[in-house]
Amino acid sequence: MTPLAQPSLAKPTRSPFSAPRLQVQRFRDGFTLIELLVVIAIIAILAGMLLPALAKAKAKGNGIMCLNNTKQLMMSWKLYVDDQNGKIPPAYSSNPNFNSWAYGNLDWNTANRDNWDVTNTLAKGSIWRYTGGTQKIYKCPADTFLTLGANGKPRLRSNSINSWVGMHDGQPTWFGNSPPWRMFLKDSDFVQPSDTWVFVDEHPDSINDGFFCTDMKPAPNLAQAVMPDLPASYHNGACGFAFADGHSEIKRWLDKRTIVPVKRAAFSPGNQANNRDVEWLWSKTTQRLQ
C-alpha cells in the first residue's frame, strides 16, 4: 500500500525579485521631487493671482468704513450748524474762542502732541460733543501710518474740511476771493449742496491744519492748475468725500500726480497743469456767485 504523501515542511523558495517589488510599490505611493516642485509652483501662481484680489477687497471694505465715518462726521457738523441757527463753524482758527470745527496742526513729529492728544485738538473743536466723543470717525481706517521714531504713534485725524466752508468770515484769502467765488458762512449759502463737499480724507503728507485748501484763483484755466493740498488715495487710488446734503462718496482719481505714495515727509505739489482731478475739485468745492 502506497503511503500518503506527507506535506513538505521545507520553506517555499522566495523569488529574488519579490522584496524589491514591495519596495517599488512603497516608492510609488509617495511623490517625486519634481512632482513636489510642480505643486509648489502651482500654489505660488494661484497665491500670486489671489493676493491682489484680496488686497482690493480689503481696500473696498475700508472704503465702506470710511464712508460711514464721514457720514457720521457730517451729521455731527450739521447738528452743530442747526443749533447755531445755520452759522457754519470756522474751518480753521488758532483761537479756542472762535469755535473752529477742530484744532491742532499735524505733522510727523511724535513729540508734537497735536498728533495724538485728543484733549487739545478734537475735543476742543465745536462739533466734538455732537459726535458723542467718537474719535474714530475723524479718521479713515486705511490711514495706518505712524509718526516718526521708535515710539511712533497713530495720528488722530485724516479728515479735513473744505477751505471755502466757514473760512475767514468772508475775508479775502490767498487761495481766492469772494466774489467771484461763493464762500459758505451759513447753511443757507449752499445752493448746490449735493455738489459741494464739506469733508475730505487728506493725504497723510499734506494734512496739517483743519482745512483742505482748493486754490480757485486759476479756475477755470486748467493749464494753470495748482494743488496746495493733496487728497488721499487709500482706496485703490480713490478718496472719500462728505457733501453738504449729507451723502458721502468715493472719488477715483484719474491723474497719476494725484495718487502719491506716503513718504512721511512734507508734501510738495509740483506741476499740476491740465490735471483733470483739479478740475473736478474746482467744480465740487464752490460755485461762482450769480
Image: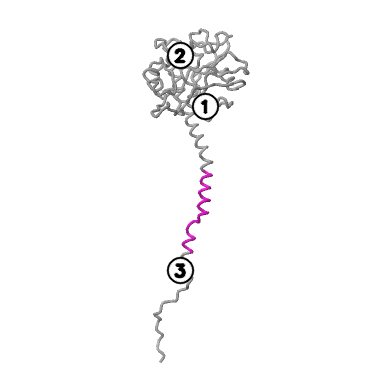
The total number of labels drawn is 3
> Which of the image's four quarters has the N terminus?
bottom left
Q: Is residue 88 above or below residue 249?
A: above
Q: Alpha-carbon neighbours of circle 2 within 10 Å: few (<14), some, or many (≥20)?
A: many
Indicate the quadrant where residue 124 lies.
top left
Looking at the image, can residue 127 be seen? Answer: yes
Name the amino acid, label 2.
Answer: Tyr
Q: Earlier in the sequence, mark 2 or mark 1?
A: 2
Q: Residue furthest bottom?
A: 1
Residue 229 x %, y %: 52, 19
Name the amino acid, label 1.
Answer: Ser
Residue 59 x %, y %: 49, 32
Indicate the quadrant where residue 133 lies.
top left
Looking at the image, can residue 134 be seen? Answer: no
Query: Could you give the CA–CA distance between mark 1 and mark 3, rounded to whole angstroms?
Result: 68 Å
Q: Secondary structure at mark 1?
A: loop
Q: Earlier in the sequence, mark 1 or mark 3?
A: 3
Query: Could you give the CA–CA distance between mark 3 and mark 2, rounded to whole angstroms?
Result: 88 Å
Residue 139 x %, y %: 44, 24
Q: Are marks 3 and 2 in contact (CB under 8 Å)?
A: no
User: Which is nearer the eye, 282 or 130?
Assistant: 282
Most frequent secondary structure within the magenta stretch: helix
Q: Earlier in the sequence, mark 3 or mark 2?
A: 3
Would you say residue 246 sits in the magenta stretch?
Answer: no
Q: Is residue 146 above or below residue 48?
A: above
Q: Which residues are magenta?
A: 24-46
Q: Alpha-carbon neighbours of circle 1 within 10 Å: few (<14), some, or many (≥20)?
A: many
In the rendered structure, find residue 19 and report the number of the disc placed on it: 3
Residue named by callout 1? 233
Residue named by callout 2? 92
Query: Could you give the CA–CA distance between mark 2 and mark 1, rounded to whole angstroms?
Result: 24 Å
Q: Are marks 2 and 1 in contact (CB under 8 Å)?
A: no
